[in-house]
């Protein structure tokens, strides 16, 4: 998970460079950013099938190998279609990495500490996102080919390490019909929505944030530093959010995160000061990230109650995250290009208002 998010977030400080060098515009930059989650969308269901039938270790190994390979190819690509394709294939592999890794973790964890462990795992993934912008900043100076090539080759060592780790294969593999039935469960669909919504928000910020900071005068290193700090605060907060999810139930932090996201989303587009915008981006990433850990915790509890394999559970999470991140990045970039940056931010802030209004009086979604 660490290496997966490392390569995913490395694009952030490089996005203005690619947008300028390849004349992408906001729409093209959005497509490049969205290619990764679009691939994750395609790989989500196959990753769940592989995990449920062949085991979590094999799922992780497939994901790690393809991510490392595509990272090297991304580093040497110099055409728009090459970069888009490499990011898309990275996204497919990402679905396998996340589904396998999280299902591996949750299957071995006690239910009473599940939120805490998911929060810690998510914090570790965010640690990868911490170093991703740093990696991108280094690549902007040393060159993308050498930077991504060296790190990509080194990450193959992780594949060998994962291969040596003990794991279990399913005794009674579940067919894909179990996943299909899950789409008829309202509690599972509600949990998935709590993953979709912050993904939309993150997608918009991942495109409009760097481009706006660049327009206001920040370079690649400063942009990378902004997202580095935001990832650090988000990672630390998820450890505590996981504990709260175990003690008070996942719905409490979900409500708090929605309320904060409404305010941040409504304020983000109006500042013209680069330092104020950087501070708001940090607050936004912290706020939006509040929703992921309790949403995952909620889904694992519901899956356990209905007997759904954890491989399918986290395939559903990838299936929820990917379109949210894709639409947020590509759609948000295109909408901002056609109108203004304020429109996608305000639309999503309104979506948080509606979600909180619908959610607030309901109690049946509280898990354990």
Image (spheres, rainbow, N blue to C red):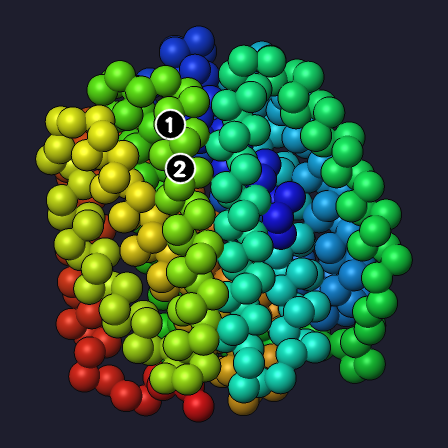
Please tell me which residue is depicted at 63% across the width and 37% down the height of the picture. Answer: 89
> Would you say residue 39 is visible in this rendering?
no
Q: Quadrant of residue 194?
A: bottom left
**Quadrant assignment for the C terminus:** bottom left
Relative to residue 129, is residue 286 drawn left or right?
A: left
Front residue of 294 and 219: 219
> Helix or strand or loop: what does disc 1 sit on?
helix
* Residue contact at pointers 1 and 2, CB within 8 angstroms: yes
Disc 1 designates what residue? Answer: 223
Q: What count of labels does the image hold?
A: 2
Which element type, helix, strand or loop, lies under badge 2?
helix
Q: Nearer the viewer, residue 65 or 216?
A: 216
At a point 39% along the width and 77% down the height, the residue shown is 244
* Label 1, label 2: how far apart the Cα atoms are: 7 Å
Q: Which residue is mark 2?
A: 227
Look at 57% across and 44% down and name the residue there.
Answer: 128
Which class describes the residues within 10 Å of circle 2: few (<14), some (14-19), or many (20+)? many
Q: 227 left or right of 133?
A: left
Mark 1 Cα shell of 10 Å, populated few (<14), some (14-19), many (≥20) = many
Inspect this view and state whether residue 144 appears. yes
Q: Position of residue 195 (x, y in %)?
A: 40, 61
Q: Residue at x 44, y 9 (%)?
A: 21
Return the residue nearer the eye: 22 or 186.
22
């Amino acid at each position: 998970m660490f290496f997966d998010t490392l390569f995913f977030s490395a694009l952030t400080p490089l996005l203005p460079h690619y947008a300028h060098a390849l004349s992408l515009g906001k729409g093209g930059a959005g497509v490049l950013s969205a290619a990764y989650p679009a691939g994750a969308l395609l790989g989500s269901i196959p990753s769940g099938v592989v995990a449920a039938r062949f085991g979590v270790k094999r799922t992780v190994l497939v994901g790690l190998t393809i991510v490392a390979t595509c990272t090297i190819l991304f580093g040497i690509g110099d055409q728009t279609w090459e970069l888009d394709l490499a990011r898309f294939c990275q996204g497919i592999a990402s679905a396998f990495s996340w589904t396998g890794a999280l299902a591996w973790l949750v299957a071995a964890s006690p239910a009473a500490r599940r939120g805490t462990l998911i929060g810690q795992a998510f914090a570790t993934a965010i640690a990868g996102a911490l170093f991703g912008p740093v990696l991108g900043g280094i690549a902007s100076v040393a060159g993308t080919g050498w930077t991504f090539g060296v790190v990509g080759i080194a990450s193959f060592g992780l594949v060998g390490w994962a291969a040596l780790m003990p794991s279990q294969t399913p005794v009674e593999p579940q067919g894909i019909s179990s996943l299909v039935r899950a789409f008829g469960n309202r509690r599972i669909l509600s949990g998935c929505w709590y993953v979709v919504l912050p993904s939309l928000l993150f997608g918009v910020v991942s495109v409009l944030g760097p481009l706006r900071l660049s327009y206001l005068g920040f370079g690649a290193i400063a942009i990378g530093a902004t997202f580095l700090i935001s990832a650090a605060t988000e990672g630390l907060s998820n450890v505590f959010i996981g504990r709260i999810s175990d003690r008070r139930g996942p719905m409490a932090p979900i409500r708090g995160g929605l309320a904060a996201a409404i305010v941040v989303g409504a304020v983000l587009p109006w500042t013209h000061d680069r330092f104020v915008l950087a501070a708001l981006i940090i607050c936004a990433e912290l706020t939006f990230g509040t929703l992921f850990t309790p949403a995952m915790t909620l889904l694992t509890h519901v899956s356990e109650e209905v007997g759904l394999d954890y491989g399918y559970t986290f395939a559903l999470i990838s299936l929820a995250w990917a379109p949210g991140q894709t639409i947020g990045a590509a759609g948000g970039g295109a909408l901002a290009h056609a109108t203004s940056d304020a429109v996608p931010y305000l639309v999503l802030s309104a979506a948080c208002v509606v979600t909180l209004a619908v959610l607030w009086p309901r109690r049946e979604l509280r898990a354990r």
